[in-house]
């Protein structure tokens, strides 16, 4: 069964907001083949991941433990190592007023691969951050117990956001450096560590979300340096507002920055930042960045940053995705104007555009050939004028706008939490960026933008509704997600769940195509730029005209009695489809007798004229063309009184007399409610089976448990309706095994 979720409302076109499929039961099918789940009894907070494709491992950091999981089946735990806080540390932490059970624990936060194959790992360590080296040898994960000071590398507070990157063996980090979490820092931890100045003009109550290295120095004709880009939100200084306004920011530093000689000693000379805009219609306050993913298809000039945004102060229920070109960010930093503070009243400063003279070398720029030619070969050589300028004016005047100046996607509903982007090669050889967006309600959306037309291909519910997606990671063919309670793995595509050619082609999934020879929706394995193959795919147009016409659906015979009420079931093919009913080839028009429902046709108080051949078609429009598929056919015949078949369906309805119309309608309504309840249980029943859909992992204790929880929690009804589950089974067997039509025509009332 395809369960229908409430339709999602959009802000405005061209934003597609209704997922082609809302995968409630398809999740099951999808993960049934190749999805996996991991969870260890008594361990929580699976929110740090490192992909070690060289070792075939997913390194998963949790609370007080690190796991090495099989990359192809994360249920398979290969090794684990515990990193627990000592009793002494825990006591100290709780004496300082922190929660013993929650805050005074060691949350693994930083995991990076080092050049020698070892890993660098840091944890909050009961509000006393600490770092260590870890290796995986002979199937064992070992910590070296070096316990380096983790201040400035890893947050003290496990609830605080942070960001870090390991570049050429050196750690760059953005977090708070003190116990109170009030001193934010962006730093490089080498022997000569470099950091930001403690000034609100540099960092003002920031919330760090991501850090990315971009190798701009490679073969740079200008002799430029590599950059480390930082994404965060912070309290704005540039708004004239009485209340606190937050803004999203992108900042960057140069890799070879060594700080200044007298001014900005051991501080960044290249820290510049600017506002990052993600315009959403009808919102007053800027949206705030929550996560960022660097997508590069060639050298660094091709890099695009994809980011998810949510409203501040719960001003709306929308989330958005915006993408930024590296060239646009670079342009603002290397060519744009600066902002400068101007005192307005005694204690108030206003930030305005700086229109005075800018010293040479340009403040905030990396050392390049031009600077070297003038004798500035290191940042230590930079003149005080340049350094003082950037120390006081790290903020650029112009904001960075997203590609095409619009959000790629705006959607109402659970907040977007994380994003990763994969590249898919379509049948015609074109490549497409496929976004996987994690949500606060434990699902992942799969989204593609075709020339400005954004399509939500599917939504997969990985965790319980109350379990936000806390991390997403990508390998070549798999997506890994973590929540506080479990980690999950799913394939980037599972074409097999599209059962018809129309479903397969209209889904517009770049990974899938309809193989005419095999009569199956299959993964695209080879490229066919000329369109001569036996596979159909139509991504931009959603054109399914090449799909073969579907065979005739066998009619289900129904005998009815005058005055009875009949419901003919017929489910639409997808959320975007609408239903059309015909009786003896004439369209059925809604009337007192006929009610066209979302999932079927209700014939109330059927008269002798109600007999005939009923057909139900699902119509889906794509690219201003209608695709019609016949989903169900019923042959209604007038029967003799009290014949078995109908009384079996719902005897109460039959006993009503023609005259008792009012009563009848009430009974009908009650019956509909009953059916709704039964349907709900079918749905719930499926979720009951949900754990079986995963590859059973006897190895990992409790692997099945969170799913069970997940299933139950998806239903908001509690446990009241378990008995009905059995009734439904009887119902089906009573109907008999009516071939494959069963799928489409589920019940007759
Ligand atoms: C860790 O997970 C538990 C259980 O879901 C949750 O209550 C807690 O808030 C999480 N801790 C952090 C720091 O996210
Ligand atoms: C995945 O790993 C688990 C635990 O080792 C094992 O029981 C299960 O059979 C594996 N599944 C597949 C599909 O290999
Ligand atoms: C990057 O690639 C583009 C297109 O392939 C090319 O034009 C450009 O010169 C390359 N830039 C660098 C720095 O290699
Ligand atoms: C389509 O299916 C047939 C039969 O299974 C197979 O031989 C053929 O390779 C498939 N075509 C493509 C392009 O995958």
Image: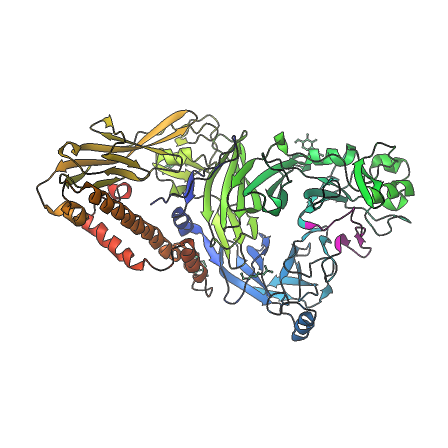
Location of residue 748 in the rendering, given as x and y in whole percent from the top left corner: 22, 44
Q: Which of 522 and 739 is in front in this view?
A: 739
From what the image shows, is residue 470 above or below residue 432?
below
In magenta stretch: residue 200: yes
Determine the residue positioned at 64% across, 68% down: 104
Residue in the image at 45% along x and 60% along y: 706
Q: In which quarter of the image is residue 661?
A: top left
At horizontal 66% and vertical 59% (from top left) the residue drawn is 118
Q: Is the magenta stretch mostly helix, strand or loop?
A: loop
Q: Is residue 14 magenta?
A: no
Q: In which quarter of the image is the N terminus?
A: top left
Q: How many marks?
A: 0
Q: Nearer the viewer, residue 401 or 318?
A: 318
Residue 369 sits in quarter: top right
- Residue 298 occupies which quadrant of the picture? top right
Q: In this view, does 678 lie to the left or right of 528?
A: left
Image position, residue 440 (x, y; %): 53, 50
Q: In this view, does 579 lie to the left or right of 197?
A: left
Which residue is situated farthest in the left direction here?
640
**From this viewpoint, is residue 31 visible?**
yes
Q: From this viewpoint, is residue 546 visible?
A: no
How far across and how far down the image is residue 183, in percent? 75, 56
- Residue 119 horizontal side relative to residue 584, left or right: right
Please state the horizontal and vertical placement of residue 451, each as a whole percent of the image. 54, 29
Q: Tell me the magenta residue range.
A: 183-207
């Amino acid at each position: 069964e395809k369960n229908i979720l409430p339709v999602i409302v959009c802000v405005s076109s061209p934003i597609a907001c209704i997922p082609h499929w809302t995968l409630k039961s398809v999740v099951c099918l999808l993960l049934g083949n190749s999805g996996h789940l991991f969870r260890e009894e008594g361990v929580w907070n699976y929110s740090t991941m490192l992909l070690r494709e060289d070792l075939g491992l997913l390194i998963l950091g949790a609370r007080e433990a690190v796991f090495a999981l099989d990359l192809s089946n994360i249920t398979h735990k290969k090794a684990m190592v515990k990193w627990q806080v000592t009793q002494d540390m825990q006591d100290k932490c709780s004496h300082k007023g922190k929660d013993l059970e929650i805050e005074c624990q060691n949350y693994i936060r930083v995991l990076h691969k080092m050049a020698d194959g070892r890993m660098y790992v840091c944890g909050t360590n009961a509000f006393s951050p600490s770092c260590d080296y870890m290796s995986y040898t002979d199937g064992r994960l070992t910590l070296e117990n070096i316990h380096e000071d983790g201040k400035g590398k890893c947050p003290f507070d496990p609830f605080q956001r942070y960001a870090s990157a390991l570049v050429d063996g050196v750690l760059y980090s953005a977090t708070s450096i003190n116990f109170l979490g009030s001193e934010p820092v962006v730093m490089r931890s080498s022997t000569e560590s470099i950091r930001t100045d403690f000034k609100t003009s540099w960092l003002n109550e920031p919330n760090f979300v991501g850090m990315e290295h971009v190798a701009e120095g490679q073969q740079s004709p200008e002799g430029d340096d590599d950059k480390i880009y930082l994404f965060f939100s912070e309290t704005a200084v540039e708004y004239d507002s009485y209340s606190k306004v937050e803004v999203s920011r992108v900042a960057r530093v140069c890799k070879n920055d060594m700080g200044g000689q007298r001014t900005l000693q051991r501080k960044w000379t290249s820290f510049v930042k600017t506002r990052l805009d993600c315009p959403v219609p009808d919102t007053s306050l800027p949206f705030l960045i929550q996560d960022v993913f660097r997508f590069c298809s060639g050298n660094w000039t091709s890099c695009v940053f994809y980011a998810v945004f949510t409203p501040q102060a719960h001003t709306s229920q929308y989330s958005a995705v915006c993408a930024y070109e590296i060239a646009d960010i670079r342009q603002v930093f290397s060519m744009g104007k600066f902002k400068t503070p101007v005192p307005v009243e005694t204690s108030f400063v206003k930030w305005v555009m700086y229109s005075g003279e800018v010293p040479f070398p340009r403040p905030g720029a990396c050392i390049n050939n031009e600077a070297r030619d003038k004798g500035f070969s290191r940042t230590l050589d930079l003149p005080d004028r340049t350094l003082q300028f950037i120390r006081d004016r790290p903020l650029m005047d112009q904001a960075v706008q997203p590609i095409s100046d619009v959000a790629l996607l705006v959607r109402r509903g659970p907040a977007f939490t994380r994003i990763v982007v994969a590249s898919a090669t379509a049948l015609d050889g074109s490549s497409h960026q496929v976004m996987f967006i994690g949500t606060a309600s434990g699902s992942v959306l799969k989204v593609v933008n075709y020339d400005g037309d954004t399509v939500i291909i599917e939504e997969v519910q990985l965790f319980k509704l109350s379990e936000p997606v806390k991390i997403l990671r990508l390998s070549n063919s798999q997506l890994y997600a973590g929540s506080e309670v479990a980690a999950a793995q799913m394939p980037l595509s599972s074409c097999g769940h599209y059962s018809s050619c129309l479903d397969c082609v209209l889904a517009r999934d770049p990974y899938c195509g309809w193989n005419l020879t095999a009569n199956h929706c299959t993964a695209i394995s080879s490229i066919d730029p000329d369109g001569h193959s036996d596979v159909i795919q139509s991504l931009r147009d959603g054109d399914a005209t090449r799909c073969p016409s579907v065979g005739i659906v066998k009619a289900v015979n129904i005998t009815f009695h005058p005055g009875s009420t009949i419901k003919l079931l017929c489910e639409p093919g997808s959320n975007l489809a609408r239903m059309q009913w015909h009786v003896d080839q004439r369209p059925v028009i809604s009337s007192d007798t006929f009610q066209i429902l979302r999932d079927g046709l209700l014939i109330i108080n059927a008269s002798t004229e109600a007999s005939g051949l009923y057909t139900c078609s699902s119509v889906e429009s794509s690219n201003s063309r209608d695709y019609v598929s016949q989903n169900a056919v019923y042959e209604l015949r007038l029967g003799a009184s009290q014949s078995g078949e109908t009384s079996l369906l719902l005897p109460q309805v039959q006993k009503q007399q023609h005259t008792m119309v009012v009563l009848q309608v009430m009974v009908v309504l009650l019956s509909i409610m009953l059916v709704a309840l039964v349907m709900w249980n079918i749905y719930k029943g499926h979720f009951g089976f949900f754990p079986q859909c995963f590859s059973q992992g006897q190895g990992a204790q409790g692997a099945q448990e969170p799913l069970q929880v997940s299933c139950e929690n998806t239903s908001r009804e509690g446990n009241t309706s378990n008995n009905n589950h059995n009734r439904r089974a009887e119902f089906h067997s009573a109907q008999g095994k009516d071939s494959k039509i069963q799928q489409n025509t589920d019940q007759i009332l």
